[in-house]
Amino acid sequence: MPNYRKLHDPNAEYTMRDLSSGTMGLTSESGHRDVKITDVQTTMVDGNYPWILVRVYTDAGVVGTGEAYWGGGDDAIIDRMAPFLIGETPFDIDRLYEHLVQKMSGEGSISGKTISAISGIEIALHDLVGKLLEIPAYQLLGGKYRNSVRIYCDCHAGDESEPASNAREAERVVNELGYDAIKFDLDVPSGHEKDRANRHLRGPEIRHKVDIVREVTERVGDRADVAFDCHWSFSTGSAHQLASALEEYDVWWLEDPIPPENHDSQRQVTQSTTTPIAVGENVYRKHGHRRLLEEQAVDIIAPDLPRVGGMRETRKIADMADTYYIPVAMHNVASPVGTVASAHVAAAIPNSLAVEFHSYQLGWWEDLIEEDNLIQNGRMKITEKPGLGITLDLDAVEEHMVGGETLFDEV
């Protein structure tokens, strides 16, 4: 039985291992606060994107693993930050995050590669602290709302310009792979383009995109929700025309129809249509998402966790979105490390719709970790193991490393 008298003793030192096991004993005379960071290392894996894996080492022999967004957070930036972490306790995740943002301000730490690099370290700290305390990472975010997280599959047909090809792939992914949430690209050639640089959609181009949406949504019917991605390709007027033309179809959301810089134009597009508009992967930190949310410029917010600032920053964005009753659908093109980190946050927030999975056509995605069957029937079960609850298979990491990379040190 737990010694509950110790719960009220301010001088007693406990770990979450004691709380969960009921032993309520001391793990050491000095306590966990004496654990120090000793090193930060990176390795880049050649997946369907270059996945930048990050490991934070400690003098307790415990290591945390994270992932930085593929378009940023390169090895040199992370190496530059390592001296700011060595000798620090890993438990002060928020303080270390802000410490790195301040120290890296000269490198542009409010956005871009630098904040993506910090994201990888921040995820690794959650994994590390969860292991030290022997609790799952979601518990560090306040606990969970759900035991499993819905995963939506980003799909790619053999001929993405052909509506029927997209419809066939949609049916295959739903029937054979078990997903009930999928996404297809709409910024595909139609054969009617005159000048793609001006972002203007002519009538035949709009009709081509409507044909893709109609065939896909009609093929899967009520068996799956279907979103469509535009990758910031169209002008404000063309985005409005396209969104209006799609209003009669069962579109889960239309993603990134215009370039991300102009919030006023984004608000205009969103508020001019009943087609739900999703935005967010191409902005950084809670500050980048603030106007989108405050001005009701989105219907669904889509932060990318290994890019936007990490797990706690994504939680802060979700909290802000919940103030405006806006759901969260996390963009994700990560390895199992970043994907599982996103799932932990999705479990810990009330307004999660789904987390993206972008590697369904990559046969060895799950080989990078020792655990099996992460995604089953379009859902990811949230593990009760400490930290992120996954273990890197270093042999698989070494097999798939980008040329010239160096494998992590053994623990």
Image (tube, rainbow, N blue to C red):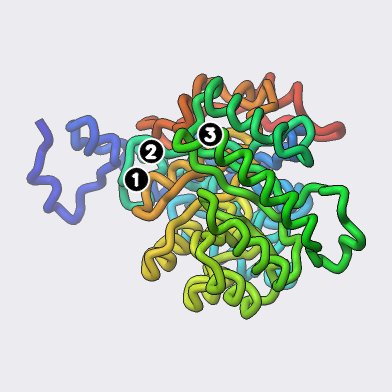
Left or right, 75 with reference to 411 = right
> Which residue position holds label 1?
139
> Which residue position holds label 3?
220
Marks 1 and 3 sit apart, C-alpha to C-alpha, by 36 Å
Circle 3: residue type: Val
Question: For the point 71% across and 39% down, which residue is it?
Answer: 163
Pinpoint residue 110: horizontal percent, then vertical percent: 65, 69
Left or right, 207 with reference to 9 = right
Pinpoint residue 196: horizontal percent, then vertical percent: 87, 60
* Quarter residue 97 falls in: bottom right
* Quarter residue 158 falls in: top right
Q: Nearer the viewer, residue 330 or 152?
A: 152
* Quarter residue 55 falls in: top right
* Residue 21 drawn above or below residue 115: above
Q: Quadrant of the C terminus?
A: top right
> Which residue position holds label 2?
136
Q: Do callouts 1 and 2 mark residues in contact (Cβ within 8 Å)?
A: yes
Question: For the point 24% across and 34% down, which residue is it?
Answer: 20
Pinpoint residue 383: horizontal percent, then vertical percent: 39, 31
* Residue 396 drawn above or below residue 330: above
Q: Nearer the viewer, residue 247 or 339?
A: 247
Graded by Cα atoms within 10 Å as few (under 14), some (14 to 19) or many (20 or more), the crowding at tag 3 reads many
* Residue 287 drawn above or below residue 192: below
Marks 1 and 2 sit apart, C-alpha to C-alpha, by 6 Å
Marks 2 and 3 sit apart, C-alpha to C-alpha, by 36 Å
Question: For the point 62% across and 80% down, which residue is it?
Answer: 264
Graded by Cα atoms within 10 Å as few (under 14), some (14 to 19) or many (20 or more), the crowding at tag 1 reads some
Question: For the point 68% across and 35% down, which residue is it?
Answer: 166
Q: Nearer the viewer, residue 116 or 146?
A: 146
